[in-house]
Amino acid sequence: MKKLLVVVALALSAAACSSGPGSPWRQSYGKTFYEPNDGMAALYIIRDDPGQDDSPIGITNGQSPVGSLAGFTWMRLDLAPSLYDLRASGTQGSTELIITVNAGQSRFFLAEPKPPGNAQLREIRQDEGRRLVRKGQAVAGSP
């Protein structure tokens, strides 16, 4: 009888530790999320709910424009390992962010309006970034 109780207790403990389909871990790191391509880094730039400031935020990499985010949207950049100069531009100005990426990385940045008429990029945690990507709409060119 004691052996049966031990087996039942171990089985219940294992079931409690396993992650079900609705667990926060599964929602953040589930199978359906896009992983970086081989030898590349995946950089996600997300525009959360714009609230009252729905003006588009332009994103550039160096001198090359990569796209614009308006509303609740996101884009993905596949980048080779290197140093990058990213810029978020509002209607009046822009803010620069210099980052280094490594192969296999997935990084998430929030594009936010910054008064007056400026914009900024701010890195956010992976679980928050994945949640926002799943909730928003991809802009053209993103998977």
Image: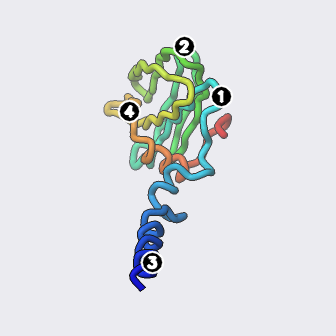
Residue at x 55% of width, y 19% of height? 81
Q: Amino acid at mark 1?
A: Asp
- Left or right of 94 in this view: 133: right
Residue at x 51% of width, y 29% of height? 58
3D distance between C-alphas at marks 1 and 3: 44 Å
Q: Which residue is mark 1?
A: 38
Residue mark closest to the camera, 3 vs 4: 3
What element does badge 2 sit on? loop
Q: Are marks 2 and 1 in contact (CB under 8 Å)?
A: no
Q: Nearer the viewer, residue 62 or 102?
A: 102
Q: Position of residue 30 (x, y in %)?
A: 56, 52
Residue mark closest to the camera, 2 vs 1: 1
Label of residue 122 in the image: 4
Sort mark 2 into few (<14), some (14-19) or many (20+) by Cα contacts within 10 Å. Answer: few
Between disc 1 and disc 4, whose residue precedes?
A: 1
3D distance between C-alphas at marks 3 and 2: 63 Å
Residue at x 57% of width, y 36% of height? 75
3D distance between C-alphas at marks 2 and 1: 26 Å
Quadrant into which the C terminus falls: top right
Between disc 3 and disc 4, whose residue precedes?
A: 3
Q: Amino acid at mark 4?
A: Arg
Sort mark 1 into few (<14), some (14-19) or many (20+) by Cα contacts within 10 Å. Answer: few
- Residue lying farthest bottom? 1
Quadrant into which the N terminus falls: bottom left
Q: Which residue is mark 2?
A: 63
Label of residue 50 in the image: none
What element does badge 1 sit on? loop
Q: Position of residue 76 (x, y in %)?
A: 58, 34
Q: Which residue is mark 3?
A: 8
